[in-house]
Image (cartoon, rainbow, N blue to C red):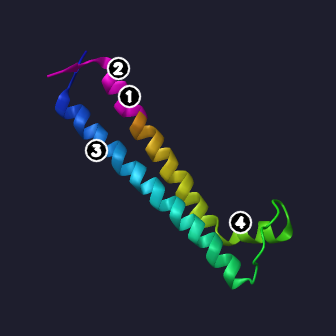
Amino acid sequence: MTTNVSQVGLLAIEAHHYKRLRRQAKYRLESAYSNWKSANRVFDRIERDSPEWNAMMEGTHDEYLALEDAKRHERNAQARLERAIAKGVTV
């Protein structure tokens, strides 16, 4: 079975869309970390698994989950695109 160029194009646009959403989610998570640190007067690096780290992870949990969800969508869209291309493209 083959895939036509327009189908591949739509899948490429979809993959690009989810890549952009993943980048936005990563930025939101990094901003949430920064905001949490400012609000809690933490100005140094936080050691992983320290009480401060655990508190920050709890305070930014929703943003973390949003990033993980965005990564999953990006991977799935990329896989759909790659499968369509692997089937062969007709013009």
Q: CA distance from mark 2 to mark 1?
A: 6 Å
The image quadrant where one finds the C terminus is top left
The x, y position of residue 59, in whole percent, is: 68, 72
Residue 13, labelled with which disc?
3
Q: Residue at x 47, y 54 (%)?
A: 22
Residue 82, labelled with which disc?
1
Label 4 sits on residue: 57
Q: Which residues are magenta?
A: 79-91
Q: CA distance from mark 1 to mark 4?
A: 34 Å
Whether label 1 touches label 4, CB < 8 Å: no
Q: Earlier in the sequence, mark 3 or mark 4?
A: 3
Label 2 sits on residue: 86
**Mark 1 closeness class: few <14, some 14–19, many ≥20 residues within 10 Å:** some
Q: Earlier in the sequence, mark 3 or mark 2?
A: 3
Please state which of residues 19 and 57 is positioned toward the viewer in this rendering: 19
- Three-letter code for the amino acid on which mark 2 is drawn: Ala
Q: CA distance from mark 4 to mark 2?
A: 40 Å
